[in-house]
Image (tube, rainbow, N blue to C red):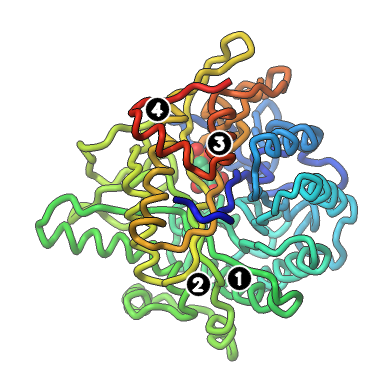
Amino acid sequence: MFPKDFLWGGATAANQIEGAYLEDGKGLSTADVMTLGSHQKKRRITQILEKDEYYPSHKAIDYYHHFKEDIALFAEMGFKVYRMSIGWSRIFPNGDETEPNEKGLEFYDQIIDELEKYHIIPLVTISHFETPLGLQKYGSWQNRKVVDFYVRYAKVLLERYNDRIHYWLPFNEINCMSTQSWVAAGIDSDDEKIRMQAAYHQFLASAKVVKLAHQINPENKVGMMYCGHFAYANSADPDDVIGTMNFMHQMMFYCDVQCRGYYPKYKLKELDRLKILLPIRQGDLEILKEGTVDFLSFSYYCTHVTGKKTNGILKGMNGLDTGYKNTFLTKSSWGWTVDPQGLRYALNYLYDRYQLPMMVVENGLGAIDILDGEEIHDDYRISYLREHLIQLEKAIETDGIPVMGYTMWGPIDLIAASTGEMKKRYGFIYVDADDLGRGSLKRYKKDSFYWYQKVIETNGKILEEENENEKIYRYG
Ligand code: BG6
Protein backbone atom coordinates (compact mmCIF):
# COMPACT_ATOMS: atom_id res chain seq x y z
CA MET A 1 0.00 0.00 0.00
CA PHE A 2 1.13 3.52 -0.70
CA PRO A 3 0.90 6.02 2.18
CA LYS A 4 -2.31 8.02 2.03
CA ASP A 5 -0.55 11.35 1.53
CA PHE A 6 1.76 9.94 -1.14
CA LEU A 7 2.82 12.62 -3.64
CA TRP A 8 2.05 11.36 -7.14
CA GLY A 9 3.10 13.50 -10.04
CA GLY A 10 5.50 14.21 -12.85
CA ALA A 11 8.78 16.04 -13.47
CA THR A 12 10.14 18.29 -16.21
CA ALA A 13 12.98 20.76 -16.73
CA ALA A 14 12.62 24.29 -18.09
CA ASN A 15 15.12 23.96 -20.94
CA GLN A 16 13.51 20.74 -22.17
CA ILE A 17 10.00 22.13 -22.44
CA GLU A 18 9.75 25.92 -22.45
CA GLY A 19 11.27 27.05 -25.74
CA ALA A 20 10.97 30.87 -26.05
CA TYR A 21 14.69 30.88 -25.45
CA LEU A 22 15.12 34.63 -25.77
CA GLU A 23 11.66 35.82 -24.84
CA ASP A 24 10.98 38.43 -22.14
CA GLY A 25 14.62 39.14 -21.52
CA LYS A 26 15.90 35.59 -21.08
CA GLY A 27 19.64 35.17 -21.63
CA LEU A 28 21.35 32.20 -23.26
CA SER A 29 22.08 29.17 -21.13
CA THR A 30 24.44 26.24 -21.60
CA ALA A 31 21.46 24.22 -22.90
CA ASP A 32 20.79 26.78 -25.65
CA VAL A 33 24.10 26.12 -27.38
CA MET A 34 23.74 22.34 -27.58
CA THR A 35 22.90 20.99 -31.01
CA LEU A 36 20.62 18.12 -31.85
CA GLY A 37 22.24 14.70 -31.45
CA SER A 38 21.07 11.12 -31.52
CA HIS A 39 21.81 7.76 -29.95
CA GLN A 40 24.75 7.47 -32.33
CA LYS A 41 25.76 11.13 -32.51
CA LYS A 42 26.91 13.19 -29.56
CA ARG A 43 25.40 16.66 -29.15
CA ARG A 44 27.86 19.44 -29.97
CA ILE A 45 28.50 22.41 -27.73
CA THR A 46 28.98 25.47 -29.87
CA GLN A 47 29.38 28.20 -27.20
CA ILE A 48 28.03 30.74 -29.69
CA LEU A 49 25.03 30.12 -31.91
CA GLU A 50 25.91 28.82 -35.34
CA LYS A 51 23.78 29.51 -38.37
CA ASP A 52 22.12 26.48 -39.98
CA GLU A 53 22.46 24.43 -36.79
CA TYR A 54 19.41 23.20 -34.94
CA TYR A 55 19.22 23.86 -31.20
CA PRO A 56 16.35 21.89 -29.64
CA SER A 57 15.92 24.04 -26.51
CA HIS A 58 15.05 27.13 -28.55
CA LYS A 59 11.60 25.84 -29.34
CA ALA A 60 11.18 22.65 -27.32
CA ILE A 61 7.44 22.02 -26.88
CA ASP A 62 6.70 25.71 -26.43
CA TYR A 63 5.43 25.21 -22.90
CA TYR A 64 6.10 28.93 -22.47
CA HIS A 65 2.90 29.54 -24.42
CA HIS A 66 1.07 26.29 -23.60
CA PHE A 67 1.59 25.95 -19.86
CA LYS A 68 -2.05 26.55 -18.93
CA GLU A 69 -3.22 23.78 -21.20
CA ASP A 70 -0.43 21.46 -20.01
CA ILE A 71 -0.98 22.04 -16.31
CA ALA A 72 -4.71 21.47 -16.83
CA LEU A 73 -3.81 18.06 -18.28
CA PHE A 74 -1.56 17.28 -15.29
CA ALA A 75 -4.48 18.21 -13.05
CA GLU A 76 -6.79 15.96 -15.05
CA MET A 77 -4.45 13.05 -14.30
CA GLY A 78 -4.76 13.98 -10.63
CA PHE A 79 -1.20 15.20 -9.96
CA LYS A 80 -0.54 16.02 -6.32
CA VAL A 81 2.92 17.37 -7.05
CA TYR A 82 4.72 18.79 -10.08
CA ARG A 83 8.49 18.86 -10.16
CA MET A 84 9.51 21.78 -12.36
CA SER A 85 12.63 23.81 -12.76
CA ILE A 86 13.18 27.53 -13.06
CA GLY A 87 15.38 28.77 -15.88
CA TRP A 88 18.22 30.64 -14.17
CA SER A 89 18.88 32.75 -17.28
CA ARG A 90 15.25 33.89 -17.32
CA ILE A 91 15.79 35.43 -13.89
CA PHE A 92 19.42 36.53 -14.25
CA PRO A 93 19.99 36.63 -18.03
CA ASN A 94 23.78 36.65 -17.77
CA GLY A 95 23.99 35.17 -14.31
CA ASP A 96 25.93 38.04 -12.76
CA GLU A 97 23.41 40.91 -12.67
CA THR A 98 22.58 42.45 -9.32
CA GLU A 99 18.84 42.73 -10.01
CA PRO A 100 16.56 39.99 -11.35
CA ASN A 101 14.56 40.18 -14.56
CA GLU A 102 11.00 40.87 -13.41
CA LYS A 103 9.49 39.51 -16.62
CA GLY A 104 11.14 36.13 -16.03
CA LEU A 105 9.76 35.97 -12.51
CA GLU A 106 6.29 36.90 -13.72
CA PHE A 107 6.29 33.87 -15.99
CA TYR A 108 6.89 31.56 -13.02
CA ASP A 109 4.32 33.50 -10.91
CA GLN A 110 1.76 32.47 -13.50
CA ILE A 111 2.82 28.84 -13.38
CA ILE A 112 2.51 28.78 -9.60
CA ASP A 113 -0.93 30.43 -9.94
CA GLU A 114 -2.02 27.62 -12.24
CA LEU A 115 -0.67 24.92 -9.93
CA GLU A 116 -2.42 26.47 -6.95
CA LYS A 117 -5.66 26.58 -8.90
CA TYR A 118 -5.50 22.77 -9.11
CA HIS A 119 -3.95 22.24 -5.63
CA ILE A 120 -0.79 20.82 -7.15
CA ILE A 121 2.27 21.20 -4.91
CA PRO A 122 5.34 22.57 -6.71
CA LEU A 123 8.71 20.91 -6.16
CA VAL A 124 11.27 23.23 -7.69
CA THR A 125 14.70 22.46 -9.07
CA ILE A 126 16.66 25.69 -8.90
CA SER A 127 19.23 24.63 -11.49
CA HIS A 128 18.46 21.86 -13.94
CA PHE A 129 21.15 21.56 -16.59
CA GLU A 130 21.21 25.21 -17.65
CA THR A 131 23.85 27.52 -16.28
CA PRO A 132 23.70 31.03 -17.78
CA LEU A 133 26.15 31.23 -20.67
CA GLY A 134 27.21 34.64 -19.39
CA LEU A 135 29.05 32.88 -16.58
CA GLN A 136 31.52 31.36 -19.04
CA LYS A 137 33.68 34.45 -18.72
CA TYR A 138 34.29 33.49 -15.08
CA GLY A 139 35.03 29.84 -15.91
CA SER A 140 31.54 28.94 -14.69
CA TRP A 141 31.41 26.80 -11.53
CA GLN A 142 35.15 26.57 -11.43
CA ASN A 143 35.09 30.10 -10.05
CA ARG A 144 33.94 30.74 -6.50
CA LYS A 145 32.20 33.94 -7.60
CA VAL A 146 29.56 31.74 -9.20
CA VAL A 147 28.60 30.46 -5.73
CA ASP A 148 27.55 34.01 -4.83
CA PHE A 149 25.73 34.55 -8.12
CA TYR A 150 23.83 31.31 -7.64
CA VAL A 151 22.95 32.07 -4.01
CA ARG A 152 21.70 35.51 -5.05
CA TYR A 153 19.47 33.85 -7.64
CA ALA A 154 18.21 31.24 -5.17
CA LYS A 155 17.50 33.94 -2.58
CA VAL A 156 15.31 35.81 -5.04
CA LEU A 157 13.24 32.64 -5.54
CA LEU A 158 13.11 31.70 -1.86
CA GLU A 159 11.93 35.17 -0.91
CA ARG A 160 9.46 35.66 -3.73
CA TYR A 161 7.87 32.24 -3.26
CA ASN A 162 8.30 32.26 0.51
CA ASP A 163 4.79 31.05 1.25
CA ARG A 164 4.05 29.32 -2.05
CA ILE A 165 6.86 26.80 -2.55
CA HIS A 166 8.24 24.59 0.20
CA TYR A 167 10.08 21.82 -1.64
CA TRP A 168 13.38 22.76 -3.25
CA LEU A 169 16.20 20.95 -5.05
CA PRO A 170 19.25 23.19 -5.51
CA PHE A 171 20.78 21.09 -8.32
CA ASN A 172 19.53 18.43 -10.66
CA GLU A 173 21.70 15.28 -10.62
CA ILE A 174 24.67 16.93 -8.99
CA ASN A 175 26.85 13.86 -9.66
CA CYS A 176 26.60 14.53 -13.41
CA MET A 177 29.60 16.77 -12.77
CA SER A 178 31.62 13.57 -13.16
CA THR A 179 29.90 12.32 -16.29
CA GLN A 180 28.81 15.39 -18.29
CA SER A 181 30.15 18.53 -16.72
CA TRP A 182 28.97 20.90 -19.47
CA VAL A 183 25.39 19.89 -18.86
CA ALA A 184 25.76 19.93 -15.08
CA ALA A 185 27.88 23.03 -14.69
CA GLY A 186 28.89 24.70 -17.94
CA ILE A 187 32.36 23.12 -17.77
CA ASP A 188 33.58 21.79 -21.09
CA SER A 189 36.51 19.82 -19.76
CA ASP A 190 37.39 16.31 -18.59
CA ASP A 191 40.05 17.64 -16.29
CA GLU A 192 39.39 16.03 -12.92
CA LYS A 193 40.89 18.93 -11.01
CA ILE A 194 38.54 21.45 -12.64
CA ARG A 195 35.55 19.17 -12.14
CA MET A 196 36.32 18.54 -8.49
CA GLN A 197 36.74 22.23 -7.79
CA ALA A 198 33.46 22.97 -9.53
CA ALA A 199 31.74 20.20 -7.55
CA TYR A 200 33.12 21.69 -4.36
CA HIS A 201 31.59 25.04 -5.28
CA GLN A 202 28.23 23.44 -5.99
CA PHE A 203 28.30 21.66 -2.61
CA LEU A 204 29.02 24.94 -0.93
CA ALA A 205 26.26 26.71 -2.87
CA SER A 206 23.78 23.97 -2.04
CA ALA A 207 24.65 24.06 1.67
CA LYS A 208 24.21 27.83 1.72
CA VAL A 209 20.82 27.48 0.07
CA VAL A 210 19.73 24.87 2.63
CA LYS A 211 20.59 27.26 5.45
CA LEU A 212 18.97 30.22 3.74
CA ALA A 213 15.81 28.28 2.92
CA HIS A 214 15.43 27.26 6.56
CA GLN A 215 15.99 30.82 7.74
CA ILE A 216 13.50 32.27 5.29
CA ASN A 217 10.80 29.77 6.10
CA PRO A 218 11.22 26.89 8.56
CA GLU A 219 8.61 25.00 6.57
CA ASN A 220 11.02 24.71 3.63
CA LYS A 221 12.45 21.29 2.83
CA VAL A 222 15.54 21.15 0.68
CA GLY A 223 16.66 17.95 -0.96
CA MET A 224 19.59 16.65 -2.93
CA MET A 225 19.07 15.06 -6.33
CA TYR A 226 21.27 12.13 -7.31
CA CYS A 227 21.52 10.82 -10.86
CA GLY A 228 20.67 7.21 -10.15
CA HIS A 229 23.78 5.26 -11.07
CA PHE A 230 23.61 1.89 -9.37
CA ALA A 231 25.83 -1.06 -10.20
CA TYR A 232 25.85 -4.81 -9.71
CA ALA A 233 29.20 -6.61 -9.59
CA ASN A 234 29.81 -8.65 -12.71
CA SER A 235 30.68 -11.73 -10.65
CA ALA A 236 31.58 -12.94 -7.19
CA ASP A 237 35.25 -12.51 -8.10
CA PRO A 238 36.51 -10.18 -5.35
CA ASP A 239 38.25 -8.08 -8.02
CA ASP A 240 34.88 -7.44 -9.65
CA VAL A 241 33.38 -6.57 -6.28
CA ILE A 242 36.16 -4.10 -5.49
CA GLY A 243 35.87 -2.64 -9.00
CA THR A 244 32.18 -2.10 -8.32
CA MET A 245 32.85 -0.55 -4.94
CA ASN A 246 35.27 1.90 -6.58
CA PHE A 247 32.74 2.71 -9.25
CA MET A 248 30.05 3.45 -6.69
CA HIS A 249 32.44 5.57 -4.62
CA GLN A 250 32.88 7.85 -7.65
CA MET A 251 29.17 8.52 -7.51
CA MET A 252 28.29 8.17 -3.84
CA PHE A 253 30.68 10.80 -2.59
CA TYR A 254 28.24 13.39 -3.94
CA CYS A 255 25.53 11.98 -1.69
CA ASP A 256 27.94 11.59 1.23
CA VAL A 257 28.88 15.27 1.17
CA GLN A 258 25.32 16.52 0.82
CA CYS A 259 23.69 14.11 3.26
CA ARG A 260 26.46 13.89 5.87
CA GLY A 261 28.05 17.30 5.54
CA TYR A 262 31.65 16.27 4.94
CA TYR A 263 33.88 14.57 2.38
CA PRO A 264 34.27 10.83 2.98
CA LYS A 265 37.76 9.49 3.68
CA TYR A 266 37.92 7.45 0.47
CA LYS A 267 37.43 10.64 -1.56
CA LEU A 268 39.96 12.68 0.39
CA LYS A 269 42.53 9.92 -0.12
CA GLU A 270 41.82 9.85 -3.83
CA LEU A 271 42.08 13.63 -4.18
CA ASP A 272 45.37 13.40 -2.34
CA ARG A 273 46.67 10.77 -4.73
CA LEU A 274 45.62 12.91 -7.68
CA LYS A 275 47.21 15.96 -6.04
CA ILE A 276 43.94 17.86 -6.27
CA LEU A 277 43.52 20.58 -3.70
CA LEU A 278 40.00 21.67 -2.85
CA PRO A 279 39.63 25.46 -2.72
CA ILE A 280 38.56 25.39 0.95
CA ARG A 281 38.35 28.71 2.76
CA GLN A 282 37.90 29.42 6.41
CA GLY A 283 34.38 28.63 7.57
CA ASP A 284 33.52 26.47 4.54
CA LEU A 285 33.59 23.16 6.36
CA GLU A 286 31.09 24.49 8.91
CA ILE A 287 28.83 25.60 6.09
CA LEU A 288 28.91 22.11 4.55
CA LYS A 289 28.20 20.58 7.95
CA GLU A 290 25.29 22.90 8.72
CA GLY A 291 23.82 22.71 5.22
CA THR A 292 22.97 19.03 4.95
CA VAL A 293 19.81 18.22 3.05
CA ASP A 294 16.39 17.39 4.50
CA PHE A 295 15.60 14.66 2.02
CA LEU A 296 17.24 12.60 -0.69
CA SER A 297 15.78 12.40 -4.16
CA PHE A 298 17.07 10.63 -7.23
CA SER A 299 16.36 9.69 -10.81
CA TYR A 300 16.08 6.05 -11.71
CA TYR A 301 16.13 4.64 -15.22
CA CYS A 302 18.45 1.64 -15.29
CA THR A 303 21.28 -0.22 -13.58
CA HIS A 304 24.83 -1.03 -14.64
CA VAL A 305 27.15 -4.00 -14.33
CA THR A 306 30.67 -3.13 -13.26
CA GLY A 307 33.82 -4.97 -12.25
CA LYS A 308 37.58 -5.12 -12.49
CA LYS A 309 37.54 -3.80 -16.08
CA THR A 310 35.39 -0.78 -15.28
CA ASN A 311 37.72 2.10 -15.57
CA GLY A 312 36.59 5.22 -13.75
CA ILE A 313 33.14 6.64 -14.22
CA LEU A 314 30.73 6.64 -17.11
CA LYS A 315 31.51 9.07 -19.87
CA GLY A 316 28.42 10.86 -21.10
CA MET A 317 24.82 9.83 -20.98
CA ASN A 318 24.82 8.47 -24.51
CA GLY A 319 27.28 5.73 -23.72
CA LEU A 320 26.49 4.18 -20.33
CA ASP A 321 29.16 1.66 -21.21
CA THR A 322 30.89 -0.01 -18.28
CA GLY A 323 32.44 -2.82 -20.27
CA TYR A 324 29.87 -5.39 -19.10
CA LYS A 325 26.38 -6.46 -20.06
CA ASN A 326 23.51 -7.69 -17.93
CA THR A 327 22.16 -10.77 -19.70
CA PHE A 328 19.17 -10.93 -17.34
CA LEU A 329 17.72 -7.63 -18.49
CA THR A 330 16.19 -6.22 -21.66
CA LYS A 331 17.03 -2.76 -22.95
CA SER A 332 15.08 0.25 -24.18
CA SER A 333 15.49 1.40 -27.79
CA TRP A 334 18.15 3.81 -26.51
CA GLY A 335 20.11 0.98 -24.90
CA TRP A 336 19.17 1.65 -21.26
CA THR A 337 18.54 -1.52 -19.25
CA VAL A 338 15.05 -2.05 -17.92
CA ASP A 339 15.32 -3.16 -14.30
CA PRO A 340 12.28 -2.56 -12.09
CA GLN A 341 13.73 -4.53 -9.15
CA GLY A 342 16.75 -2.29 -9.36
CA LEU A 343 14.53 0.54 -8.15
CA ARG A 344 13.79 -1.35 -4.94
CA TYR A 345 17.48 -2.13 -4.61
CA ALA A 346 18.38 1.53 -5.17
CA LEU A 347 15.95 2.75 -2.52
CA ASN A 348 17.35 0.26 -0.02
CA TYR A 349 20.94 1.08 -0.96
CA LEU A 350 20.45 4.79 -0.34
CA TYR A 351 18.26 4.46 2.72
CA ASP A 352 20.67 2.03 4.41
CA ARG A 353 23.34 4.67 3.98
CA TYR A 354 21.53 7.85 5.03
CA GLN A 355 18.15 7.15 6.67
CA LEU A 356 16.66 10.26 5.11
CA PRO A 357 13.16 10.66 3.70
CA MET A 358 13.33 9.80 0.02
CA MET A 359 11.63 10.72 -3.20
CA VAL A 360 11.86 9.22 -6.67
CA VAL A 361 11.87 12.36 -8.80
CA GLU A 362 12.48 10.81 -12.22
CA ASN A 363 11.65 7.46 -13.75
CA GLY A 364 10.29 6.65 -17.16
CA LEU A 365 10.74 5.04 -20.53
CA GLY A 366 12.03 6.90 -23.57
CA ALA A 367 10.38 5.25 -26.57
CA ILE A 368 9.13 5.89 -30.07
CA ASP A 369 5.38 6.43 -30.08
CA ILE A 370 3.08 6.10 -33.05
CA LEU A 371 0.13 8.41 -33.40
CA ASP A 372 -2.82 6.31 -34.52
CA GLY A 373 -5.51 8.80 -35.52
CA GLU A 374 -5.88 10.73 -32.27
CA GLU A 375 -4.63 7.86 -30.07
CA ILE A 376 -1.33 6.45 -28.91
CA HIS A 377 -1.31 2.88 -27.65
CA ASP A 378 1.74 2.85 -25.42
CA ASP A 379 1.33 -0.45 -23.56
CA TYR A 380 5.13 -0.71 -23.31
CA ARG A 381 5.21 2.49 -21.23
CA ILE A 382 2.35 1.35 -19.00
CA SER A 383 4.10 -1.93 -18.48
CA TYR A 384 7.46 -0.28 -17.68
CA LEU A 385 5.92 2.13 -15.17
CA ARG A 386 3.65 -0.45 -13.64
CA GLU A 387 6.58 -2.81 -12.96
CA HIS A 388 8.57 0.00 -11.38
CA LEU A 389 5.69 1.17 -9.23
CA ILE A 390 5.15 -2.37 -7.96
CA GLN A 391 8.78 -2.43 -6.81
CA LEU A 392 8.43 1.03 -5.31
CA GLU A 393 5.47 -0.19 -3.31
CA LYS A 394 7.52 -3.17 -2.08
CA ALA A 395 10.28 -0.84 -0.94
CA ILE A 396 7.70 1.09 1.08
CA GLU A 397 5.56 -1.77 2.34
CA THR A 398 8.01 -4.66 2.68
CA ASP A 399 11.25 -2.82 3.40
CA GLY A 400 9.78 0.11 5.35
CA ILE A 401 11.43 2.91 3.39
CA PRO A 402 9.86 6.34 3.86
CA VAL A 403 9.23 7.45 0.29
CA MET A 404 7.42 10.77 0.09
CA GLY A 405 6.47 10.67 -3.56
CA TYR A 406 7.08 9.74 -7.15
CA THR A 407 7.36 12.15 -10.07
CA MET A 408 7.46 10.29 -13.35
CA TRP A 409 9.90 11.82 -15.83
CA GLY A 410 8.47 13.68 -18.71
CA PRO A 411 4.70 13.45 -18.16
CA ILE A 412 4.47 15.41 -21.38
CA ASP A 413 6.79 14.62 -24.31
CA LEU A 414 9.85 16.84 -24.17
CA ILE A 415 13.28 17.04 -25.70
CA ALA A 416 15.76 14.47 -24.44
CA ALA A 417 18.67 15.81 -22.42
CA SER A 418 21.23 13.35 -23.71
CA THR A 419 20.38 13.49 -27.41
CA GLY A 420 18.16 16.56 -27.87
CA GLU A 421 15.68 14.39 -29.73
CA MET A 422 11.91 14.74 -29.63
CA LYS A 423 11.35 11.22 -30.83
CA LYS A 424 12.65 9.80 -27.55
CA ARG A 425 9.29 10.26 -25.89
CA TYR A 426 8.47 9.76 -22.21
CA GLY A 427 5.09 11.42 -21.89
CA PHE A 428 1.57 10.50 -20.91
CA ILE A 429 0.80 13.38 -23.25
CA TYR A 430 1.97 13.26 -26.85
CA VAL A 431 3.17 16.48 -28.46
CA ASP A 432 3.04 16.74 -32.21
CA ALA A 433 6.61 17.87 -32.91
CA ASP A 434 9.56 16.16 -34.52
CA ASP A 435 13.31 16.33 -33.94
CA LEU A 436 13.59 19.54 -35.94
CA GLY A 437 10.69 21.22 -34.18
CA ARG A 438 8.23 20.71 -37.04
CA GLY A 439 4.63 19.90 -36.20
CA SER A 440 1.45 21.47 -34.89
CA LEU A 441 2.47 21.17 -31.19
CA LYS A 442 -1.00 19.78 -30.58
CA ARG A 443 -1.28 17.71 -27.40
CA TYR A 444 -2.86 14.19 -27.40
CA LYS A 445 -3.58 11.90 -24.45
CA LYS A 446 -1.85 8.53 -24.71
CA ASP A 447 -3.32 5.32 -23.24
CA SER A 448 -0.85 5.74 -20.37
CA PHE A 449 -2.54 9.06 -19.50
CA TYR A 450 -5.72 7.24 -18.47
CA TRP A 451 -3.74 4.50 -16.78
CA TYR A 452 -1.76 6.93 -14.58
CA GLN A 453 -4.97 8.76 -13.78
CA LYS A 454 -6.33 5.46 -12.38
CA VAL A 455 -3.10 4.77 -10.49
CA ILE A 456 -3.38 8.14 -8.74
CA GLU A 457 -7.13 7.90 -8.19
CA THR A 458 -6.76 4.52 -6.46
CA ASN A 459 -3.51 5.50 -4.71
CA GLY A 460 -1.78 2.63 -6.47
CA LYS A 461 -4.41 -0.05 -5.69
CA ILE A 462 -4.97 -0.63 -9.37
CA LEU A 463 -1.43 -1.99 -9.58
CA GLU A 464 -2.31 -4.87 -7.25
CA GLU A 465 -5.32 -5.81 -9.33
CA GLU A 466 -3.31 -5.68 -12.51
CA ASN A 467 -0.66 -7.81 -10.89
CA GLU A 468 -3.16 -10.44 -9.86
CA ASN A 469 -4.64 -10.58 -13.31
CA GLU A 470 -1.19 -10.64 -14.90
CA LYS A 471 -2.25 -8.37 -17.67
CA ILE A 472 -2.04 -4.79 -18.73
CA TYR A 473 -5.28 -2.88 -18.79
CA ARG A 474 -6.09 -0.39 -21.50
CA TYR A 475 -7.92 2.78 -20.60
CA GLY A 476 -9.49 5.49 -22.63
C1 BG6 B 1 17.92 12.76 -16.27
C2 BG6 B 1 17.80 14.25 -16.41
O1 BG6 B 1 19.25 12.44 -16.21
O2 BG6 B 1 17.49 11.96 -17.32
C3 BG6 B 1 16.71 14.71 -17.37
O3 BG6 B 1 17.62 14.87 -15.16
C4 BG6 B 1 16.69 13.81 -18.58
O4 BG6 B 1 16.92 16.06 -17.67
C5 BG6 B 1 16.41 12.37 -18.13
O5 BG6 B 1 15.80 14.22 -19.56
C6 BG6 B 1 16.26 11.37 -19.23
O6 BG6 B 1 17.34 11.42 -20.09
P1 BG6 B 1 17.13 11.67 -21.64
O7 BG6 B 1 18.48 11.84 -22.18
O8 BG6 B 1 16.44 10.46 -22.15
O9 BG6 B 1 16.31 12.89 -21.74
158 versus 333 height, above or below: below
> How far, Cα to Cα, is label 2 from label 3?
27 Å
Q: At 36% across and 51% down in the image, what residue appears?
A: 394
- Which element carries disc 2, helix, strand or loop? helix
Precedes in sequence: disc 2 or disc 3: 2
Q: Which residue is mark 1?
A: 206
Left or right relative to 117: residue 10: left
Kindly indicate whether the residue at mark 3 contacts the one at mark 1 (C-beta within 8 angstroms). Answer: no
Amino acid marked by disc 2: Gln
Residue 183 screen position, x and y as percent: 56, 50
> How far, Cα to Cα, is label 1 from label 3?
26 Å
Precedes in sequence: disc 4 or disc 3: 4
Kindly indicate whether the residue at mark 3 contacts the one at mark 4 (C-beta within 8 angstroms). Answer: no
Kindly indicate whether the residue at mark 1 contacts the one at mark 4 (C-beta within 8 angstroms). Answer: no
- Which element carries disc 3, helix, strand or loop? loop
246 versus 56 height, above or below: below
> How far, Cα to Cα, is label 4 from label 3?
13 Å
| Residue 347 position by quadrant | bottom left
Amino acid marked by disc 3: Ala
> How far, Cα to Cα, is label 4 from label 1?
35 Å
Which quadrant of the rendered structure holds the C terminus?
top right
Q: 408 or 171: which is nearer to us? A: 408
> How far, Cα to Cα, is label 1 from label 2?
8 Å
Kindly indicate whether the residue at mark 4 contacts the one at mark 2 (C-beta within 8 angstroms). Answer: no
Precedes in sequence: disc 1 or disc 2: 1
Q: Which residue is mark 3?
A: 416
Q: Which residue is mark 2?
A: 258
Precedes in sequence: disc 2 or disc 4: 2
Cβ at disc 3 under 8 Å from ligand 1? yes
275 versus 348 height, above or below: below
Q: Which residue is mark 4?
A: 333
- Which element carries disc 1, helix, strand or loop? helix
